[in-house]
Amino acid sequence: MFIDNPSKVDGAINAGDVRYVLVRADGLMGCFKSNWNSTSLMMYKEIENSFFRFGRKSTQQYAKSLGGDPKELLLKIEGMAPQLGWGNWRLALDSNELKLTLTVKNSPFSAGYGQADFAVCAPISGMLRGVAEEIFKQTAISSEHRCAAMGADVCKFEAVIEPSINTLKAV
């Protein structure tokens, strides 16, 4: 199991003080499909931000347990993702460009949503942002630039350091 010594008590799955839950991917993603409008876009941003905040907490715990080694952290996350039902993850770290890329085969979010005209894997984008911030120790931004819900064979994401106003050159 992905969690070291998980406890299953009274119908709950816990790792320390963190509770996990298994849900149907189509059940979760179905809330975004009905009556698509500008509120739906805000919901996507909120779910991405939520997975960033709470996923970052988990990422920080994993990093601490691994002595802060970024490569070991990425290997742990790659190993955990399929066990959590988040598809098969392949992370690539480019320390020179302060960039982290992620390829996901069999994303539950694209599978749960079905055919779409836009990228739907907001939870993964949020998680990737949390991982990038833990590794680079700077504010990051993430995006999904290829999605299986849009007909791609895999979903692809990128997280980079957020440009600072102070570092931008005048045009």
Image: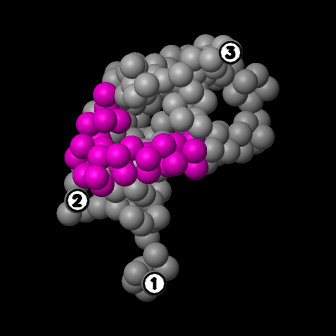
Please give left or right for residue 3 compared with residue 17 in the image: left
Q: Which mark is residue 95?
A: 2
For the residues labelled 1 and 2, the Cα–Cα distance comes to: 21 Å
Residue at 75 percent of width and 42 percent of height: 38
Type of amino acid at the residue the image marks with label 3 = Asp
* x then y, percent, for residue 121: 52, 32
* Residue 89 x %, y %: 33, 30
Contact flag, marks 1 and 2 (Cβ < 8 Å): no
Quick one: SS at disc 1?
Answer: helix
Q: Is residue 84 left or right of residue 36?
A: left
Please identify, in this view, whether the residue under mark 2 or under mark 3 is nearer the observer.
Answer: 3
The quadrant in which the N terminus is found is top left
Between marks 3 and 1 in the image, the one whose residue lies nearer the viewer: 3
> Does the magenta-highlighted stretch encompass residue 56?
yes
Q: Which range of residues does the magenta coloring cover?
A: 51-79
User: Circle 2 sits in a helix, a strand or a loop, which is it?
Assistant: loop
**Disc 1 marks which residue?**
166
Q: Percent from the top left, x then y, of residue 42?
A: 71, 44
Residue 62: image quadrant is top left
Marks 2 and 3, how far apart in space? 44 Å
Residue sitting at x 57%, y 17%: 8
Q: Residue 10: which disc?
A: 3
**Image point 57% across, 44% down: which residue?**
54
Mark 2 and mark 3 lie on one chain; the one further toward the N terminus is: 3
Q: Which mark is residue 17?
A: none
Secondary structure beneath disc 3?
A: loop
Q: Amino acid at mark 2?
A: Ser
Query: Image quarter for residue 117?
Result: top right
